[in-house]
Amino acid sequence: MKKYLYIILASALVSCNETGKHMPKDEIPTIYPDYVGVTIPTTIAPLNFSMADDDVERMNITLSNTRGDKYEVSSEYAEFNIDEWQNLLSKSKGDSLSVLVKAKKGEIWTDYKPFYIYVSNDTLADKGITYRRLAPTYNINSIYMGLYCRDLSSYDEITVIDNKLSDVMCINCHIQNQTSTKDMMVHIRGNLPATYIRHNGKEELIDTRMDSLMSVCVYNAWHPSGKFIAFSVNGTRQSFHVGGLKRIEVYDKGSDMVIYDVENHQIIRQPVLMTEDCETYPSFSPDGKWLYYCSSIRPDNDECEKFKYDIKRIAFDTDKGEVYGNIEMVINASANQKNATFPRISPNGKYMMYSECDYGTFPIHHPEADLRMLNMTTMEVDSLSNANSNDAESFHNWSADSHWFVFCSRRDDGLHTRIYIGHINDNGKCDKVFMLPQKNPKKYYMELFQSYNTPDFCDELIDINHRWLLSNLKKGAQKLSLK
Amino acid sequence: MSKNSFISQLTSKSTFIIGAILFATSIYFWMFKYPAHLAFNEQSQLFLVTYDYFLQFLKYPSGIAQYIGEFFTQFYYEIWWGAAIISALLLSIYALSYLILSSHIKKYTPAKALLALIPALIAEAFMLDRFSLLAMPIALTISLTAIYTYQTHIRKINSNTIKHISIITISILLYWLFGALSFLFAIYITLNEIISDKKYISIIYTPIAAVLPIIAYTIVPLPLQRLYTSNYYYKVMDGTPTFKYNAEEEDALLYSYFSRYKKWDAAIKRANKKMPLDMASRQILLHALAEKNLLLEKLFDYPILFSKDLISSQSGDMIEPTAISDIYFSLGMINSAELSTYNMQQLYFGQGTRTFQRMAECNIIKKDYRVAQKYINALKQTLFYKKWAEGMETMMNNEAALETHNYYGTIRERLMEETFYFSDSEIDNILAHTIKDTPSTNINFDYLVAYLILSNDLDKLAKLLEGNTQRMPKAVQEALVLHWMQNNASFDGMPWKIDNQIMLNAVDFLRNLNEGGNLQSMRAMFGNTYWFYNTFASHIIQ
């Protein structure tokens, strides 16, 4: 009863607020972020938005589903109440939400045609996402950077680690085990270097520095059993473009891969993963029987433009933690003068998503970089036109149920990377993706001078005890043995 | 203490004189001896006049001290305001110290006035470090004010309960808002009440204050050490202030100031008095000469030692990495200018007005207007850069205005659009690619010629200037003469127009050298020539 009273009052308020001349417009509104026609899960935080036009003073928005449930707001921008929004979404599962916008500029109200937001039947069970936020270049350790965990059903963000904890601490690649936070790892560089490992809930710090390896452990993938992590070791270099559109290249002068035995604290080396070529970006198949990775020949003079990675795979012995058998080509990108990196296989094993660009190790710095999705049954590649843009897309990861994926894109302003979430429907097609919601997205993203990167879903919100971490970093991390 | 007593304490002759001397010397010092430090502090912060900006300072202990500090630091935009603000704070610290001391030593003596100077002098010494923030003297002023209020009001509260609650509440508030210097309040009251009033219960105030950082530690993700030393008094997170006057650093920052405001004559004038010591300052000097079209004429009027003094991937010492960003920007190497700006932002500056201006400029020149708009929007929320930002925004929406703009139009013309990588070993090739068939890139040509000369790459220089029959600047003539003499027996047939005097001097140089001229004697006669640089620079470095 009380709720209906609110609705009546809100409607009355909205009506009262609409004094002035009304001009119907036969087009949908141009809004920021572009949420027109996107597909969302029922658990997502309200997709607040603004009119792209900064001069709009007020907006009246009516959300409704086909069953007649309705929610109206009137504000400077479309700001929805979390409870009301999620109540409406829970009633709209598998349905579409009509979004009717009226925008006031001066004394004129413009009444736009409604647009639609699709509420998927596929539940996103993962509660949050983790990501780094840092300056959009990588020349030096960033003073202002951190690893954060965002609750997807609200705007709450937890600081997992940031470098307020210690001077010039670089928080590097991190990953959960197929979104499970029981197994997770984070590299910490700087004055107190270590790799944080959480395995079956037990935390420890390991030191991956070894004379016989090219570098510390870098890019990584958890074996689904949690017993192993595949790491690359990389001779990373940076080059800077003096002119032109691109600013920076990050590439490897050489790279190998090793397997880390989590329970025995041992690095396992195998010649097949340490060849003259560059092996990097490991990823396991969901059954743990295959190790996928990227491989490029090492060009003469280490010319960055000539690094063309293919995606390959090799069988993995889940007991010994060793690879065996022949290497198989999965994506032969170099044959088409292309470059394929960052393979990520959906937990249901149906798809492999990867980044495609012209060359190099870091597609995020390449405007031409796009996501691609390989159907593992038909071996057909989907160009994911609903996910890609004219700017760079990269750093993707799958949700536990394989219906959702999170990735980074520079489409917002061409430089600062933002997070987007996409849906793969039952037909194996990608629906229109949406930008990570914020309470006031236009203001938030305009005032954010950092980039997001390496987003990954997490089944639970992550927190690391800072006191434990700092005191153990100071004590020093555990040394590893070598096999 | 009555109002009359308060005034009479402060206006007693010796107190007044010492206060006046403190204020006057401080003003003089900051305006004339240390102005570049003020400019550095101003440019390395971005104080936004917004409610959201204010709110973020409430999240950490000493945040409000930092907020007030930043508010006042923005006025350093005018150096004399900065000098006045610091001096006024020091005077307040002195006056408060004197008043507090007067409650213990009633007699008016010059010694008391001098003793009261100590906190102000400590604050002054603290501010000598370029990373020291105004938050510290502000926190000290507030803490002393709280102590003085205790003496005049709180101490006289009859109810012990109310008094305890007041002191503890003030201690908590002071700590959260102004940081660790607030401990002075609790320590003072504890000592005062135990020694003067024999109230031993007051011993609790100090441990209560001491435990506040531990409580804060459970709330905010900061190391305990930083909560005890205050997060916002010093810009470098784990650094320690030097408490020292640093003339060399001031000199380097002054060159940076000249570079920022394009005060090229001032940079040259200063170098004429005293050659800059660090690489960044030498780069700024050569940049100033280039901007005044004097680079090749006066290249060896200063003891330049390396081609890196002209241009390099970054400044050598990182005192002031802005210099190289200014040079790249001038030469139209916008990506490199942007990268240097990121670096300085990440290293020392954080989000500062200077870096934000440069990022806006770089992205406007490159037509990355979406990125530029972000920086413009931020600067529009400041007090002193709002007008500049609005002007840039107007220009951003008017390509014709930008193209014809006296300064930005020139930089747009010089914009390097070719894609290739920066390399310290390829600087001559990079500079060669920046030269276009327009007069606006004359400075780029001068840089290339100067680079070849300083690299002693005379073959490339001769090839570059093949067919040039115009009179060339002194340094170029000297280099070309030497190149000719290394390959020919006489001056006959030399294809360039060389001044007779330069040819005579060259012969003279060789004769003196062959006669065993040593470094000192040759420097006296030929120290400002390329021939001396070519022959002796490596000896000087050793």
Image (cartoon, rainbow, N blue to C red):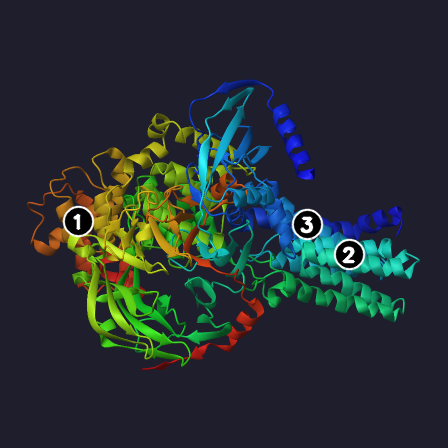
Q: Is residue B422 visible?
A: no
Residue A326's image quarter?
bottom left
Report in which chain the residue with disc 2 lies: B
Query: Residue B315 sits in which quadrant?
Result: bottom left
| Tag 1 subunit | B
Q: Residue furthest front?
A: A67
Q: Chain of mark 3?
A: B
Sequence order check, earlier mark of 1 and 2: 2
Residue drawn at x 40%, y 42% as measured from the top left: A412
Q: Secondary structure at mark 1?
A: helix
Q: Nearer the viewer, residue B122 or A308?
A: A308
Q: Amino acid at mark 3?
A: Leu
Which image quarter is the C terminus of chain A in?
bottom left
Q: Earlier in the sequence, mark 2 or mark 3?
A: 3
Q: Which residue is mark 2?
A: B170
Cα separation, mark 2 vs mark 3, equals 22 Å
Q: Are marks 2 and 3 on the same chain?
A: yes
How many dots with numbers? Answer: 3
Q: How far apart are the alpha carbons under marks 1 and 2?
A: 72 Å
